[in-house]
Image (cartoon, grey):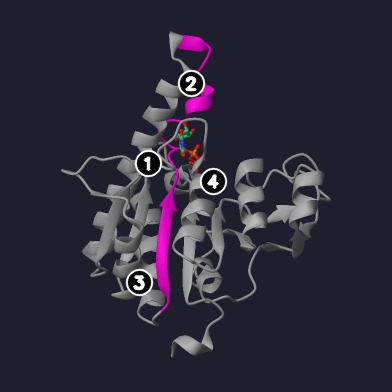
Amino acid sequence: SKQSYKWQRVLLKVSGEALAGDRSQNIDPKVTMSIAREVAAVTRLGIEVALVVGGGNIFRGSSWTGSSGLDRSSADYIGMLATVMNAIFLQATMESIGIPTRVQTAFRMSEVAEPYIRRRAVRHLEKGRVVIFAAGTGNPFFTTDTAAALRCAEINAEVVLKATNVDGVYDSDPRHNPHARLLDKLTYEEVTSKDLSVMDMTAITLCQENNIPVVVFNLNKPGNISRAIKGERVGTLIGP
Ligand code: UDP
């Protein structure tokens, strides 16, 4: 039953890069299918799952400014639109295996998805539907990590589960230091003071201010997503 799990309502953040897998395509359907299967398994246990998807596999606003005459806001709006593509792909994948899923966008595109309405999102979750929040916060200059922290706080989810391509947070960059150590636990202060690249500052301080724990874990390991959602030890836990 619900009671036997650590969390009853979680916010799963899936970055765009994670969706790309190791393919040259923007989206690897094997990745989206494995996410869908694992999310399906936990929703059947009664755990409520909301997702925030990134868009970095398609377009990242910050890397376009300066070149090409794009101003930051326009670039960021394109980035937010990219997250909607990922959200629709994930929704279709989820529904193909029988999980009712709703996409809610931070700015209106009503022919494509519902607009973000907090109470309606909560209602969907209570009915056992998965909700995918797309278009980030709806504002340029923010990230989907910040959107994850924000939506988590708004819908009273208990944790942000940040699915990435690495096992968690290391004490130094494992790509450059072969002795880098994976950290089990970290405080918000450690993340911000040591400038560990976990989430951007806005996202992590929003979590801190609202006492939202963050779990950073590797979604490429089979079973990890459902483990994280069920509250089992996986990756790095960030908290007070
Ligand atoms: N973005 C934005 N406001 C938001 C969320 C996202 O402007 O609230 C834009 C921004 O340009 C960002 C892009 O959308 O680069 C894709 O999101 P993000 O980089 O967070 O995706 P991820 O790194 O998770 O794939």
> Does label 4 point to a residue whose CB lies under 8 Å from ligand 1?
yes
Tell me, yes or no, whether the highlighted magenta stretch contains residue 54: yes
* Eye-nearest disc, 2 or 3: 2
- Amino acid at circle 1: Ala
- Amino acid at circle 4: Thr
- Label 4 belongs to which residue? 146
Which is more toward the observer, 162 or 24? 162
Q: Which residues are magenta?
A: 47-68
| Crowd class of label 1 (few under 14; some 14 to 19; many from 20; radius 10 Å) | many
Q: CA distance from mark 3 to mark 4?
A: 25 Å
Q: Earlier in the sequence, mark 3 or mark 4?
A: 3
Q: Answer above or below: position of 239 versus 19.
A: below
- Label 3 belongs to which residue? 40
- Amino acid at circle 2: Arg
Q: Answer above or below: position of 135 versus 46.
A: above
- Label 2 belongs to which residue? 72
- Label 1 belongs to which residue? 135
Q: Earlier in the sequence, mark 4 or mark 1?
A: 1
Please tell me the numbered disc located at residue 31: none
